[in-house]
Amino acid sequence: METILVLAHTAPSNDTAAANRATLTKSSLEAVTIGMSLATQLSAKLTIAVLGANAAVEAASLGESGARLLAVSGDAFTDARYTTDAAAAEALCRAAQASIVLVPSSSRFARIAAGVAHRLGGFVDAHITALSGAEGIEATRWFYRQRVEAVVSRDARPWFLLLDSGTQRPFAAAPTSAAAEQIAVEVPATRTTVTGLRAPSQGAQTIRPDAKMLFVAGAGWTKKQADGQVHSGEAAELILGFLSSTSASLGSSKSLTDQGGDGQPVLPFLSHMNQIGQTGATPRHAKGLSTCCHGEEPHVVGWRFIGDRRAISLDPNCGWTRGKADVVYIADAFAVMSKVNALLAAK
Ligand SMILES: Cc1cc2nc3c(=O)[nH]c(=O)nc-3n(C[C@H](O)[C@H](O)[C@H](O)COP(=O)(O)OP(=O)(O)OC[C@H]3O[C@@H](n4cnc5c(N)ncnc54)[C@H](O)[C@@H]3O)c2cc1C
């Protein structure tokens, strides 16, 4: 019989978003959801282990899951660092005697998963989006820029599965009277001292994987408009205004992010990190709004996991109108977004 362990962690205690500090991350809560569902399907034993600041209290908030709860906390484990995180994860896996280890694919855990699997003589797979199975476990992941979906199964144990975020409903954590077992971990010798966390301020950070909505800017924003002029300053104001009222994540077409290198007008807050598509990202958001973008296939393939797709384009023959969006507004995005921003401001 399988023994399933969900490894979860809290956000660093110096996270720039105050509300996140020392609480379970969204991707950890998604891993709890998938762990509970798999344990039910396999009639398997479920353990959930929390690592990080406030770990015991946060583990207790998962009492409703019915799982055995483990925690590792202490100054050495508050912030991400390979040596201490790997030692803690190894100790938790051994305490749980896990055959299946479900790991949220955060930057903190993605870098230790393979090392910990190796220490335990196990195997690791990444980018898992779904798990199912009654007899054996079937893990689903995408290949070839999300064009091919594969189902993977393995006999090797322990089997570590790094779960992509945005694929499950996060477990609703709530305070309970459950008590987590504290697992003692010998702090290994460290060469790295964590002195703090540096991240762009919330206003400057435009890539927000956990946002409900994706807003995509295309090259049209910096093209000559009906009056023969370029209005990139106004474009920047409209885009940033919309992002600040909605906290949407900002994506871009390749053409727009490439423009900086071509010496054309650019939107300074965009980089290649924002690019969506075949050579960019494939984020997961409930809704997406594309503006001034043509909707060509190499771009739209990055929208694979966007739920409701809408586009604003002047071109009635653009790719979006050819079946790639649910709703297309054939309109001037400057006029539409200025009206939308005014309505949002009035709210
Ligand atoms: C190998 C390869 C990989 C690629 N990978 C990617 C990728 O990962 N991501 C990606 O995005 N592209 C990628 N591309 C490029 C892709 O094929 C397109 O060239 C690109 O997506 C076009 O960007 P765009 O629609 O913003 O620009 P354009 O094609 O220039 O379209 C601009 C649009 O804005 C509209 N517009 C202008 N003004 C307004 C206005 N006021 N209101 C409303 N609409 C307006 C125009 O009508 C036009 O439809 C790749 C191409 C190749 C060959």
Image (tube, rainbow, N blue to C red):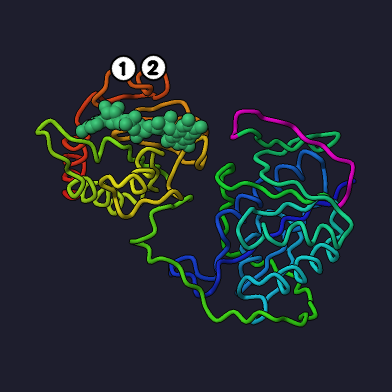
Kind of residue indicated by mark 1: Asn
> Dots 1 and 2: beta carbons under 8 Å?
yes
The disc label shown at residue 123, or none: none
Quarter of image, res 130: top right
Kind of residue indicated by mark 2: Arg
Q: Is residue 109 left or right of residue 95?
A: left
Instruction: Say what secondary structure mark 2 lies in.
Output: loop
For mark 1, what is the residue? 317
Residue 329 to residue 284: above or below: above
Q: Name the one closer to the observer, 121 or 2.
A: 121
Residue 158 to residue 14: above or below: above
Residues in magenta, as a range = 145-158
For mark 2, what is the residue? 322
Quarter of image, res 67: bottom right
* Disc nearer the start of the sequence (1/2): 1
Residue 205 to residue 251: above or below: below
Instruction: Say what secondary structure mark 1 lies in.
Output: loop
Quarter of image, res 94: bottom right
Q: At 71% from the left edge and 31% from the top edge, which residue is drawn?
A: 150
Q: Quadrant of ligand 1?
A: top left
Q: Magenta stretch containing residue 153, yes or no?
A: yes
Whether residue 103 is visible here, answered yes or no, is: yes
Q: Magenta stretch containing residue 313, yes or no?
A: no
Q: At 82% from the left edge and 49% from the top edge, which residue is drawn?
A: 159
